[in-house]
Every structure is written in structure tokens, then in C-alpha cells.
Image: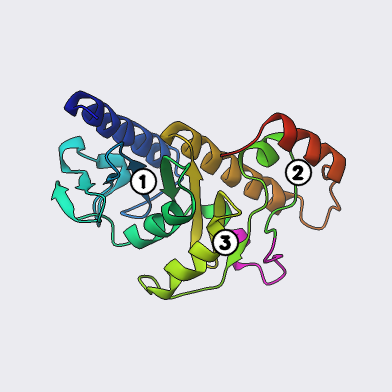
Amino acid sequence: MSCHDINRLREQVVVYGQSLFDRGLTMGSSGNISVRLEDGGWLMTPTNACMGRLDPAKLARLDANGNLVDGDAPTKESFLHMAMYDERPQSGAIVHLHSTHSVAVSCLPETDPCDCIPPLTAYYVMRVGKLPLVPYHIPGDPALAGAVQGLAGKHSAVLLANHGPVVAGKTLEAAVYATEELEETAKLFLLLRGQNPRVLSAQQIADLEARFPRD
């Protein structure tokens, strides 16, 4: 991968980070983004960085062994990204947010741990699919990586209890779009609580998954 290509990815991370921040999907220094590089390394947002004020030159670049090559130190939640990538070699990018409605769903005691949000819309099924709940761990607990890794092979997105979503995609654009779809569907789910909403049938879901396979 040329320096030009890496710089282009750096700019994309900044643009998407700014977009997520501007729309209130991440706040303060919460949330992080990573992109897989062709040499086996990664670009990651730095630790304690605001997604709305990222500097492309300061994004952490890691080699294939996770060692810092240049830029600032990576997000302290980098182990979450590594856990997903280990199980999803087809994924090219990961987004982790503390987005309000998704976190709200993760706090509900009646949330189905195998499938946190029902299949309310076709686009949710197409971009997210089933969303399992990862039990609560204190932030930074290395055991969280193992819990995520155990689910990542079968799911492109997981929801961390009382924390937020971790979403993988073939590209950065795909990962961002899936994260946005998850957040909007979480909002719909909360609005429809107690209303016995109509959800997609098993056949409708199967038809979507056959026509629009996720990574």
C-alpha cells in the first residue's frame, strides 16, 4: 500500500469521525475507528481523542504485530478491534461508539442476549443481522476481548452491555453505515416498546440474507 493510499485512508477516518461526532453519535473522547492496511497493519484513532477533532497525521499506525509505527498511541480499546479482526479476516474496518440509543438497549434488563434488537427493517437485517449482547466488563478488562472474540466469528456486530456497539465492515464506509443503521434501529426499537410491532418473518430475513450477504 502506497503512502498516497494510506494518507487517503487517514483522511477518510477523519471525515467519518467528524460526521459521527457532528450528528451526536459519539461525544467527548468516546468512540474509536480502525482500518486494516494491506501490509497486515492498522490505522486507529488515538487514545483520548475526540472524533470531531481528529488530525490525520496523528492517527496511530500499527504494524501486523500491533506495534506502533507512527502517530499517537492508539485507543486504549484497541484490543476490542483486534479481537474482531482475529475472527473476521474479511473485515476491513471497525467502528466502536457509545451511541445513546444503542447503549440504552444494552442497559435494558429484558434485552435478549442472543439478539438484542428484533428485525424491524430490511436495512437493519442487511447491514447488521443478529446482534448478540456481550456481558458487562469494566472498561479495559482484557477478558472483554475474549468475550467479543467468541461471538465475532458469527456476527459482524456485537453490543457491549452498558457500553456500546462494536461493528465491523468490509470497508470503512460499510462499517460506518452499519453502525448508523444499528443506532437508528435501536431508536425505533425504544420508540416501539410495548407496541407489539410487526417484525420481518423468517422467510423475509432469509430472502434478504441470500440477496444481500454481509461480510
Q: Secondary structure at mark 1?
A: strand
- Is the magenta region chiefly helix, strand or loop? loop
Mark 2 or mark 3: name the one nearer the start of the chain: 2
Q: Which residue is mark 2?
A: 120
**Crowd around label 1: few <14 · some 14–19 · many ≥20 (10 Å):** many
Q: Which residue is mark 3?
A: 151
- Identify residue type, mark 1: Ile
Query: Which element type, helix, strand or loop, lies under badge 2?
Result: loop
Front tag of 3 and 1: 3
Residue 63 lies within the magenta run? no
Q: Residue furthest left?
A: 70
**Which quarter of the figure is the N terminus placed in?**
top left
Q: Looking at the picture, does residue 12 appear above or below residue 198?
A: above
Q: Which label is found at residue 109?
A: none
Residue at the location (58% across, 60% down)? 104
Q: Position of residue 200 (x, y in %)?
A: 82, 42
The residues tagged by marks 2 and 3 sit, at their Cα atoms, a distance apart of 22 Å
In the rendered structure, which disc, 3 or 1, sits on the residue that comes first in sequence?
1
> Which residue appears at 36% of the width and 46% of the height?
33
Residue 115: give x, y in percent of width and height.
70, 58
Left or right of 19 in this view: 129: right
Task: Give the residue pinned by disc 1.
Answer: 33
Identify the amino acid type marked 3: Leu
Residue closest to the eye, 155 or 27:
155
Q: Which color scheme did the rendering employ for the protein?
A: rainbow
